[in-house]
Amino acid sequence: MTEFEDVRAACEGLSTEALLRYLIKERFPGETVVTASLRAPSIVALKLVADIDPSTPVVFCRPGELFEESETFRKEVVAHLGLTNISQTEGAKSGVLPDATDHYERMWAEYKGGLGHVHELVHLNDIMVHYECWISAVYHLPTRQTALRVDVEGRLIRVNPLLDWTPQDVRAFMREHDLPFHPRAGKRVDARLPEDTPCPPSYHF
């Protein structure tokens, strides 16, 4: 049995909280990193991680420009959850080792001079070289068409902790735990569009 098969078998049937606790405290202590954004599912994942170990490394991925309201909101979330090991990255394409895999998060980016969203990749190779387990909690776009909750990517164990959560589950958890939403959550990207136009909310990063 490979390490991935062993980890996957150990995680089978675990609740989201139990899964994260097993990875962070038992299987990969000191070798687990979380990537995050400012979307509600990411805040939920960060709440669960913070309750297990607030010193777990968390990397906020930031494509596009830095908006002041997003920076303020990020600081609010960090303080609210008591997270103590925080960094940010815009990503970089360097750092792919021979025979390794390009690790990245797919995100929507915004720029102050334009309207709408731009699809960008935030490359994380330089960061991931230091870890064995990656809790991927950005939740802008799916990372692959057939995502698994516990998967292998190159030499890393890559985990999608909220794979089985619905938007209703996320909102209920946010309300239950009094977690803040991004100030632009639910607002239309382009104010010129009719009120009932379906489009993703503007989160900046």
Image: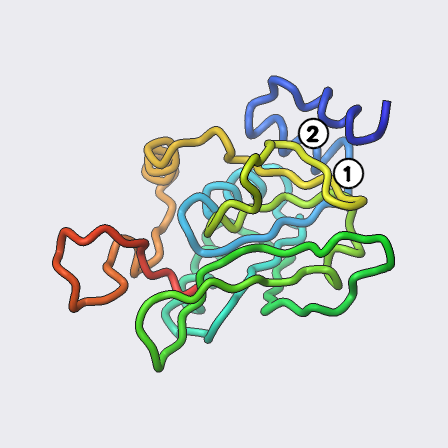
Which residue occupies 35% across, 42% down? 178
The answer to whether 159 appears left or right of 138 in the picture is right
Estimate the x, y position of residue 27 in percent, counting from the top left.
Answer: 77, 32
Question: Disc 2 designates what residue?
Answer: 22
Task: Report the front residue among 80 and 116.
Answer: 116
Estimate the x, y position of residue 21 in percent, counting from the top left.
Answer: 65, 32
Estimate the x, y position of residue 138 in percent, counting from the top left.
Answer: 52, 51
Which residue occupies 73% across, 20% down? 9
- SS for tag 1? loop
Task: Report the front residue among 183 and 193.
Answer: 193
Crowd around label 2: few <14 · some 14–19 · many ≥20 (10 Å): some
Question: For residue 158, which numbered disc appears in the image?
Answer: none
In the rendered image, the vertical position of residue 187 relative to residue 142, given as above or below = below
Image quadrant assignment for residue 93: bottom right
Crowd around label 1: few <14 · some 14–19 · many ≥20 (10 Å): some
Task: Report the front residue among 27 and 51.
Answer: 27
Amino acid of disc 2: Tyr
Which residue occupies 57% across, 36% down? 147
Scheme of image coloration: rainbow
Question: For residue 28, which numbered disc appears in the image?
Answer: 1
Estimate the x, y position of residue 111 in percent, counting from the top left.
Answer: 40, 75
